[in-house]
């Protein structure tokens, strides 16, 4: 029988062996492989280093390091991850049983095509879920969520938001666009806090700057208010600014002017659970010629 090839071990750290690290790394990604990882790590066969019958002093050290690593890193993470996804699995099966199977014809029709009447632009904030708040069901609303529920102007060029707008308006032919702002918006707070010489390399700064006109109007109209109140004012002003930006898209303005598309603003206050809704009056807004929205059909739900 051929003698086994010599094993190279770093004198600095026995766990630094590239062969051993690869086996260890692959085994700690998923919790179910923990025991296999402990057995299969080559560094544990350190008796080969000093010959038969002699155990390397590195062996006990390596085993201790591995056991500590497995206990400290892997076990708690795996337990938490299993709990989280076990809950999501249960939610999915409840959805499948109580909604999908009970409305299977509707979902089979949706599998063939969608024809939503609404396009919704809302904030990415985890507390603001349009389907949960307004009860949108699958197939009723085409949605885009971003930081601050902002609509960049047409001249800015391609973005995820206007790509979704183009698809919703030109392909799905939605009849309503609803932009929803909300209380305690971190994106608007970032906008209001941003200095004129802010770091342009920040993704957040580069995005929320699209609301700068709303910030300017807020500073002019609410300069006497404290910062928190100014932010609340800007949360609504920013929605109106996004509605005006919608009209910079030629194919949106054309449909709005022809009465084929309506644009609406909304504001959800999750502190007292109230909702404001208003519709932009296209012709009157165009007549103002000073970037001021004129709205109609304002409603307040509380």
Image (tube, grey):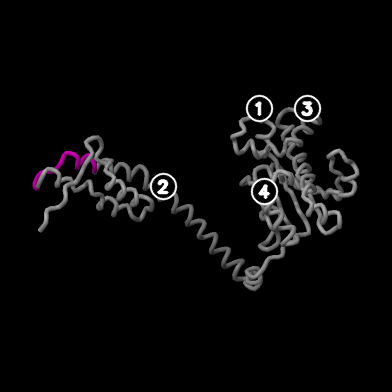
Residue 298 percent location from the top left of the image: 84, 48
> Whole-Å distance between the Cαs marked 1 and 4?
25 Å
Q: Is residue 115 magenta?
A: no
Foreground label between 3 and 4: 4
- When the figure is inspected, residue 205 is found, relative to residue 97, above or below; the finding is above
Residue 250 percent location from the top left of the image: 79, 51
> Which of the pair 107/290 is nearer the observer?
290
Which span of residues is magenta-colored?
52-62
Label 4 Cα crowd, 10 Å radius (few <14 / some 14-19 / many 20+)? few
Q: Which residue is mark 2?
A: 77
Which residue occupies 14% across, 47% down?
48
Which tag, 1 or 4, sits closer to the chain's start? 4
Q: Secondary structure at mark 4?
A: loop
Label 3 Cα crowd, 10 Å radius (few <14 / some 14-19 / many 20+)? few
Q: Which residue is mark 1?
A: 197
Q: Secondary structure at mark 3?
A: loop
Q: Which residue is mark 3?
A: 223
Which residue occupies 31% across, 48% down?
22
> Whole-Å distance between the Cαs marked 2 and 1?
41 Å
* Residue 185, picture quadrant: top right
Q: Secondary structure at mark 1?
A: loop
Which tag, 2 or 1, sits closer to the chain's start? 2
Q: Which residue is mark 4?
A: 158
């Amino acid at each position: 029988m051929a003698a086994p090839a010599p094993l190279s071990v770093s004198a600095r750290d026995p766990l630094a062996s590239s062969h051993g690290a690869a086996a260890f790394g692959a085994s700690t990604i998923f919790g179910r492989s923990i025991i296999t990882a402990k057995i299969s790590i080559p560094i544990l066969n350190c008796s080969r280093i000093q010959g038969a019958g002699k155990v390397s002093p590195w062996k006990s050290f390596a085993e201790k390091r591995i056991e500590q690593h497995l206990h400290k890193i892997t076990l708690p993470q795996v337990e938490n991850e299993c709990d989280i996804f076990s809950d999501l699995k249960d939610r999915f099966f409840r959805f499948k049983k109580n909604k999908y199977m009970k409305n299977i014809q509707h979902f089979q029709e949706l599998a063939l095509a969608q024809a939503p009447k609404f396009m919704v632009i809302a904030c990415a904030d985890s507390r603001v879920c349009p389907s949960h708040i307004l009860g949108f069901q699958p197939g009723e609303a085409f949605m885009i969520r971003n930081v601050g529920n902002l609509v960049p102007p047409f001249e800015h060029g391609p973005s995820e938001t206007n790509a979704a707008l183009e698809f919703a308006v030109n392909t799905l032919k939605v009849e309503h666009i609803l932009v929803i702002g909300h209380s305690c918006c971190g994106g608007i707070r970032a906008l209001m806090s941003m200095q004129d010489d802010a770091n342009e390399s920040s993704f957040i700064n580069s995005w929320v700057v699209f609301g700068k006109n709303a910030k300017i109007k807020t500073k002019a109209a609410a300069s006497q208010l404290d910062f928190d109140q100014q932010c609340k004012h800007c949360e609504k002003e920013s929605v109106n600014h996004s509605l005006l930006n919608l009209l910079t898209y030629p194919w949106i303005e054309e449909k709005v002017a022809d009465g084929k598309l309506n644009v609406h603003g909304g504001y959800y206050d999750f502190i007292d659970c109230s909702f404001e809704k208003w519709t932009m009056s296209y012709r009157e807004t165009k007549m103002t010629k000073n970037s001021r929205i004129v709205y109609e059909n304002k409603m307040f739900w509380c």
